[in-house]
Image (spheres, rainbow, N blue to C red):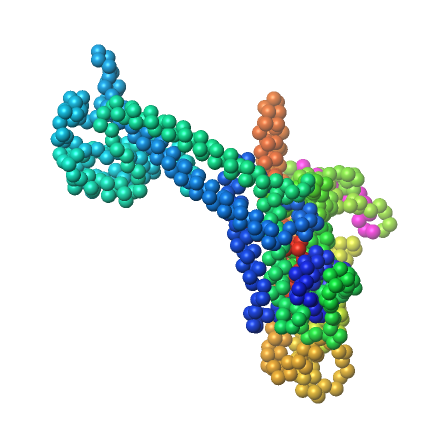
Amino acid sequence: MGILRSEKMRHGILMLPADRARHFVDQIGAKSRIQFEDMNAQGMQRPYKTYIQRIDEMERIIRFLFDELERVPDAEVTTGKLDDFLLHSGDYRLDDVEGQLKKFYKDFVQMKEHNTKLLEKRNAALEERFVLQTAVTSMSLPPRGMALRGSEQFEFSASRSLLGEESVARRGASNSPMFGTVAGVISQESQDLFARALFRTTRGNTFTHFEPIQGAMEDPKTRKPVFKSVFVVYFQDARIGQMTSAMSEKIRKVCSSFGVSTYAWPASKESSEQSRRTLEAQVEDMNAMVQAHEHMVYSEAAYLLEQPRRFSNSLIEEWRQFCVKEKSIYATLNHFDNSSMHLRADCWFPEEEEDSIRKGIVALNTQCQSTAMLVADRVPTKKTPPTYIKTTDFTRPFQDLVDTYGLPRYREANPTLLTIVTFPFLFGVMFGDIGHGLGLMAVGLASILYADRIKDIPHLETFYFARYMLFMMGFFATYAGFMYNDFLSLGLNIFGSHYATGHETGGARTEVFDPSFDAANSGGSGPYPFGVDPVWHGATNELVFMNSMKMKTSIVLGVTHMFVGLVMRCINKIHERNAIDFFCECIPMVIFMLSFFGFMVFQILYKWVTPLESPPSIINSMIAMAMFGTDPSPMFGSTLPFNLMVITMLTVPVMLIPKPLLLYLRHSGRSTHERLPDEESIELESEHDSFEIGEVVIHQVIETIEYVLGTVSHTASYLRLWALSLAHQQLALVFFQKTLSAAMVLSFPVNSFALYFVAFPLWLGITIGILMGMDIMECFLHTLRLHWVEYQTKFYHGDGHAFRPFRHRSIQEQADLTKASG
């Protein structure tokens, strides 16, 4: 059907043999467009839920494997080869993939547990080695005869044993030492809290020394680096070697609450040296075992990362896509009614594809020796068909803008048809500048030329998706820039000015330019061929002239845009064969629009092209017309505005009264006028008992008031075209004057340095950041509002529901988006 209306849809019943149902649904998802209805929604019978549960478990395993692969250095999963997968997806079988996934899951879990144990043992050996190293340092004495400086003496005394050499010697000779020691390793993040807890628990009767460990240690569970410190707690204890004292018990409870590892404190320097050498050998053995384990993990990961075909995804990605496909197939089969030998489901499909769908089913029947069939309804169903609009790369971004507001009803006029042109055009009116428009158009053109390169690059998908829209927005911004004759706030004298210097006036010797063209339209030469004459740039009355021109242009474009919306409303009612709405709503609305706002637009255009000795004020004329007052200088006399205003007022009761009355007469069966059959009559007949004349009257009153007042406010809303265009031009002018222009007036050679190294970079940054960044977004949002509120509300309901066929490609693309966002 094209883009004006959605495709015609057919409703039918698809019947599949139970033993080959999975194969048929698979082929339908690959080659056809069919939307299935849930036949088990009320009974909640899901005959294929076992398959769904199996695939859920497979997807959980795949997520686990992806997490493990992320920890493997330089492991890169090849993705984005959807076409190749869909072409070779039949190479995989559910049972085979499930068996391989379980095998890999078991292997990775075992390797992970084994690696965790290895790392715990290695870390324990490393921690004990650091404890022994701290003990050796604290027990060491400086060589005899060696003098230490003050700072070195303090550092040595702070790190050595509190008992001193003689006490250590006595400890070896006596079994009644006076001090106890608890040593271990704790994370540096917790050491301050640990020290405070010990101090409070022991009431200050302990001394804790911390020695930071150089370098980070790998956490066995999280595999993240952790910085730790060796701690040594000294406390008075006369019963060491006999029994555990109360103080020692308190300290060990604090250590246990913090989850720290404690190690035995050596009795002498010689024993600590011997133990440290033993631990170093253990650490080397553990490191060798960890490396061997890592090589095993790399070999398993290499198999999962391998591409089964030349231009395919990695094997793990192929399995993920296969699970997505199989899950969608069995989820669709759960919608079928399996109460008989065949599975049955109601479905929707495009009318133009009915023959191709039937041919595909016949071919599958021949191939599988089955009896599947598609039976289309002979009598039109009362169900509302889904909306299916075909899109291309060019129309898709515009259709998405419309769908964000609301999806069109089935066979309703699609606003996208005109939005493709009006959206970038109105944006260009607000953003009009030759230089800025060319920059935006260059971005769009580059996105078109390099589309294949940027479509898979993160953060550049938006440029790929909206590449044609960006190009058109830049094109119309450039067009409007030529219309305003505005190039980066400067005017271009392309065709030569059609104004000549007339005379000088005022004390400041102000030059007055007179038109050199035939301003009286008497057959002489015309004005500047296209756009604004460059002589207006820099004139003292430039802002007054540009404001007047842009404001009136906005009104003309706005009224035209809204009138097109009313025309679309009329087209909708004719297509629906709804005579009541056409004659009681559409025609009065059009007359209302043309009688008042159309007359205002005509006056604007007439005033532009017709020389008048004393041009009247259009605003005053419209106020006098609306108030039935006297216009001191009417453009077309006083009779025509009076008659048009009377017609405008008469259209309001026509919109308000006839429709509820005719609907009531039709409903009660007393209607005597001839009417065309329409969808509304069918709906009313089916809802005979629910008809309420009061609700219909209230609804019609609201719609009439909304249209009358909305037309006025919407016309004023289009003045944003003038406001944003003026703001864009003035911002560009201010930025130019404060940067480039200010640098040019400096004396040589300062001006050259300031221009090239200060003013130009500053001007370029401001232009790109504000005018090409923020202002583009601002103009885009205002253009979107004009289409959603001022234009689409004239005819567009937007309450349809989308046609969502079972398609492998669309399901995979949606799964990829979910994975990327998650």
Magenta region, residue range: 509-521
Q: Is residue 94 visible?
A: yes
Q: Is residue 770 left or right of residue 385?
A: left
Q: Is residue 198 left or right of residue 673?
A: left
705 lies above or below 180: below
Instruction: Using the rendered view, name the quadrant where residue 699 is placed.
Output: bottom right
Report the number of discs. Answer: 0
509 lies above or below 714: above
Of 691 and 477, the residue lying toward us: 691
Of 506 and 766, the residue lying toward us: 766
Q: Is residue 112 left or right of residue 355?
A: left
Q: Which residue sits at x=49%, y=35%?
A: 294
Tell me the quarter of the image containing the N terminus: bottom right
Q: Which residue sits at x=60%, y=51%?
A: 96
Q: Which residue sits at x=29%, y=24%?
A: 273
Residue that extends furthest to the bottom in the rendered view of this protein: 670
Instruction: Using the rendered view, name the quadrant where residue 759 is placed.
Output: top right
Of 793 and 168, the residue lying toward us: 168
As for residue 351 lying within the magenta part, the answer is: no
Picture coordinates of residue 105, whole percent (x, y): 51, 47
Picture coordinates of residue 416, whole percent (x, y): 70, 58
Q: Which residue sits at x=60%, y=65%?
A: 334
395 lies above or below 235: below
Q: Is residue 541 visible?
A: no
Residue that extends furthest to the right in the rendered view of this protein: 523
Picture coordinates of residue 361, whole percent (x, y): 75, 63
Picture coordinates of residue 322, whole percent (x, y): 62, 52
